[in-house]
Amino acid sequence: MNSRVDQLLRQRLVRVSALLIVLLALGAALLQGLAEQGGVGSDLSPVPDQPLAFPREKVFGLDLSDRPSLEAVQWLESGGAGAFGLVVVPVDADIIAALLSANERGPAFQALDQLMAVTTETTVALCLDRPVTQVEDDVLAELTVDTLRDRYPDRIAYLTACPSTSERTWAASISEQVRYGAPALPGRLVPLSTGAMAEIEAVSSFDDLRAEALRSFAGDTYALPRVHVTAPLGPGELEVSSSAIQDAAQVALILLQPDRDLDPAALTASIANVQLDAAQLPEGFSSVHSPAIHFSEQWQPSMIGRISYRHTAQEGALLQSTFVGTTIYLQTLLSPSAGSVAVWIDPEPSNPGPPFAEIDLSASQATDAAVVLAEGLAAGRHTIAIMTTGGEVTVSGLFVSGQPETGWHAGLTTLALVAIASVAMAVVGLARVQDIRDRNALPPLETPQVTHPRAYGLDEK
């Protein structure tokens, strides 16, 4: 009897193990398929409906908000700002307090002018440190924001509260003055004129920028992962950062927060030549300045705040680019006077044929929007051509979502998973066949016979 029990236990163990293998293999294949289909960052939802005020192609931004204004000026004088796509600089509390007094505004303006001068033409985000004053937050924020907007109409892209300011009411007041109804969150950069909001998120190291961790940045605003650095960046850190920008639509830039003991010139030199591949668009937003976007001569440059646009009122103006992804959007200005465009995907140079889509850009009110040009494309490299077909057309860039097809090794991985599942299913089948044979060959197990005491005429005790 013991051998029969052991045999049944072995058969049951084989069947359970085989079923687990099947489930694990199928689950792994399903997860791999989902990863290949979507790719990191490709499920960004919703797509930001306004453009960024800086080029993502530069990969890195600089965050000096943890130090006084004078130290920030000295850092930028030593290291320069040209290598960065965005620079976050602080405005000290005493500078803001000086704006309240007519007699002290001159020195305050000089300090602000110096901050603007050392950032050259780099996109600037100012963090405002609240002074100790009896003036209410909303009044103080209104005065400060109006002063900055009037004095530097085309230089400041974003405003936020400095991290040294703990009161959320100050951040909320700045957001209300800059953009009514904008959520006031710590580290959120609110556009001074137009453009998408961006949120600073501190990370512990560059390992947090690897592919498997990038989904943690997904949300309804762009993310600016901030890394504290104590030394110039090495090849590994440069590669991880560039890959994060290339492969994650929701990551706008990698913010570097340098240690006070780090030489500014050394840090700047370590990233000076870092730029994304100019041959094709990265996933996410690319402005009209991207080398991968080619415009015909009918397009004219224009600016709204810190956002660059290309505008044309001529029919037949052409925009072309290449990208790797499954969905592409046109970041454009919808308006009552806006015209229409025709779109070709992967056209033959000599015979483009009929357009893939024709899109009307008119709307009752003027607004920036991300308009779908094509979706559900095969994951891989594509060429897009956009031609105006009438009316005024204004664009700020293109937005790509979706990852490229995986390489040959992913296909082998899938085949291996299917093979494992097939073997496991075969094992299950053989185990059941053997079970049937054993049941026919062996006598049934004996079971203990329990007889009730009353059967023998005995009383229960």
Image (cartoon, grey):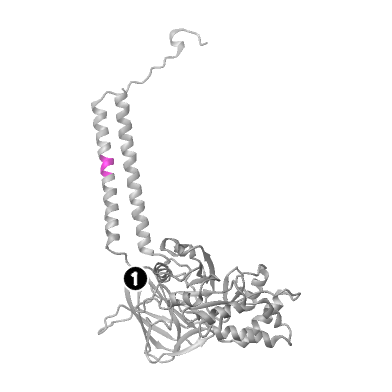
**For the magenta stretch, what is the residue range?**
425-429
In-image side of 271 versus 355 (left or right): right
Please check the rendered image and state whether residue 71 is part of the magenta-colored stretch, yes or no.
no
Residue 8 is situated, as x and y percent measured from the top left of the image, at 31, 30
- 138 or 4: nearer the viewer: 138
| Quadrant of the drawing holding the N terminus | top left
Residue at 72% across / 82% down in the picture?
100
Which residue is depicted at the point 50% across and 79% down? 79
Q: Quadrant of residue 372?
A: bottom left
Quarter assignment of residue 279 = bottom left
Q: Residue furthest right?
A: 134
- State the image coordinates of residue 420 (x, y, percent, origin top left): 28, 49
> 126 left or right of 408?
right
- The total number of labels drawn is 1
256 to the left or right of 179: left
Which residue is at 72% across, 85% downward? 104
Asked whether 293 or 156 is in front, the reply is 156
**Residue 128 at x, y = what percent?**
63, 76
Report x, y in % for residue 460: 51, 11
Prevailing SS of the magenta stretch: helix
Q: Residue furthest top?
A: 457
User: Position of 410 compared to 154: left or right?
Assistant: left
Q: Secondary structure at mark 1?
A: loop
Q: On the image, numbered disc 1 is attached to which residue?
A: 377
Measured along the vertical axis of the image, is residue 452 above or below residue 357?
above
Q: Is 428 one of the magenta-colored residues?
A: yes
Is residue 50 in view from this perspective? no
Q: Amino acid at mark 1?
A: Leu
